[in-house]
Image (cartoon, grey):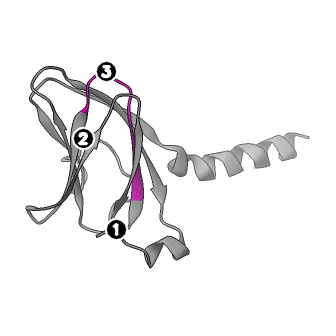
Amino acid sequence: MKTFLLLICLTFLGQLDSFAQETVEIGASESMLLTGKGQGQDGVINPYDGKECYAIIRNIGSAHFILRVQQEGKIIDTIEISSHTPEKIKLLKNYELYIDAGPELGVNATITFEPLKEDDKSESKY
């Protein structure tokens, strides 16, 4: 019985990276690099750093905000995130994800990362 419980615990811990979720709070008119430049520079930890993945952002605050996807300083896409709305964004290798708060209210959001599946790699929004 102990072996069975230990096996279940180890299996769960092995899957923990795919359930990593972080909360971000920034003030009005502020911007933050969420991910893309590496350890010590990113606002959140992406367990799939250096690989293609999805970032799932959920606005848990009352104000909308803008997400910016950039690569080498060039803006690839901007996405407006409404209150209590989730958005799933495909992040290719070397993409940077920024969050921009509006002038009135700050941002309160959660970010979760998922790996790309093989069939997702052939499709690209960009």
Disc 2 on helix, strand or loop?
loop
Give amino acid for label 3: Ser
Spatial CA span between label 3 and label 1? 28 Å
Earlier sequence position, callout 2 versus callout 1: 2
Spatial CA span between label 2 and label 1? 24 Å
Left or right of residue 57, residue 73 in this image:
left
Q: Which residue lies under the disc numbered 3? A: 62
Picture residue at 81% right of the left edge, 41% below the top = 5
Give amino acid for label 1: Lys
**Location of residue 34 in the rendering, given as x and y in whole percent from the top left corner:** 25, 45
| Towards the viewer: 89 or 73 | 89
**Location of residue 56 in the rendering, given as x and y in whole percent from the top left corner:** 42, 47
Give amino acid for label 2: Gly
Disc 3 on helix, strand or loop?
loop
Earlier sequence position, callout 3 versus callout 2: 2
Q: Which residue lies under the disc numbered 1? A: 125
Spatial CA span between label 3 and label 2? 21 Å
**Location of residue 17 in the rendering, given as x and y in whole percent from the top left corner:** 51, 50
